[in-house]
Amino acid sequence: MEIQRFLASPDGGSNGKTKPRLNPNLSTYTEYWQSIDPVEQHAIGQYHAIAGAHNSLWDEIYKRTLTKAWQEDPRGLGSCAIPDSYAIDGLDAVFTFDLIQLRNRRSNETQVANHLNGCPHHREGVGCALKELKGPKCLDYVDMYIDDEIEQRFGICLMPVKPYLDHIGLAGADQSTVPMVLHPEVNNEFTQKTVAAINQITEYIKTFPILTT
């Protein structure tokens, strides 16, 4: 069962700054992480590495492009506004339940600004609170709106990241009879090569002038 996010307006601190009001029904991110099986932790760590590198790539692209559809959404900042289950829908891995739980706790522990949000994970002045916990559909979403500008400005066409994230969770030979199992030792080299390739594109993007801050 998916635990519902708690996004109440923040309380005011004694120093005049806002502070998050946490959902008391959720354990902390750290507590939940420590409860996960070590094999799954290893696999999720690989997911973090690839998704985090891809998220950093987009941070650099945002600074150097003018298309900002996610800022113009009439519902407020953050235009994804998709449920956690849909964000990772189709991910061929066995740790998707734990990934959703970690996403909820990360969002719950990130300061909540008192303003309208299109996406419950978006924070004013921060952006998406999830970062390396973004689902494949979150990471690939914005490309639908900005791919033309990326091609014209940088001369490249970005491929979706989902197939690379899919590679982390390996299945048995016959998925109809063999349960999904994780083989993190098989994926270490693949993850390292994928992160290196994404970082190489990021360094290339950084050679272009910053247009927005």
Image (spheres, grey):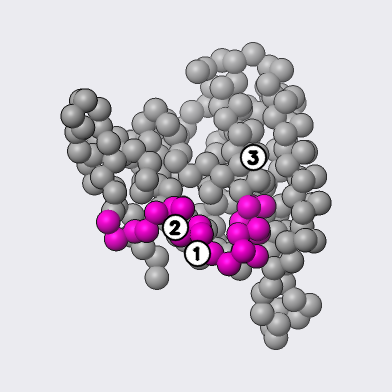
Q: Label 1's element?
A: helix
Instruction: Classify the position of the N terminus by image quarter.
Output: bottom left
Q: Whole-percent x and y of residue 87?
A: 51, 54
Determine which residue is flagged by label 2.
31
Identify the mark nearer the N-term, 3 or 2.
2
Segment colored magenta: 24-47
**How far apart, in angstroms, are the residues tagged by discs 1 and 2?**
6 Å
Q: Name the mark on residue 213.
A: none
- How many numbered marks, from 0 up? 3
As drawn, 2 above or below 122: below
Residue placed most toward the observer, 184 or 79: 184
Q: Mark 1 or mark 3, which is nearer to you?
A: 1
Quarter occupied by residue 11: top left
Q: Residue at x 62, y 64 (%)?
A: 38
Amino acid at circle 2: Glu
Q: Is residue 205 above or below residue 106?
A: above
* Secondary structure state at the residue bearing disc 3: helix
Q: Which one is earlier in the sequence, the residue at label 1 or at label 3?
A: 1
Q: Mark 3, residues whose alpha carbon is within 10 Å: few (<14), some, or many (≥20)?
A: many
Residue 150 in percent (x, y) is at 65, 28
Query: What residue sits right under mark 1 in the picture?
Result: 35
Gap between marks 1 and 3 measured at Cα:
27 Å
Instruction: Locate residue 52, reporting x and y percent.
Output: 61, 42
Q: Main secondary structure of the magenta part?
A: helix
Q: Residues within 10 Å of mark 2 (few under 14, many from 20)?
A: few
Say which amino acid is labelled 3: His
Q: Which residue is mark 3?
A: 54
- Res. 120 in view: yes
Vertical arrangement, residue 16 with respect to residue 37, above or below: above
Instruction: Give the quarter of the image for residue 166.
Output: bottom right
Residue most toward the bottom? Answer: 177
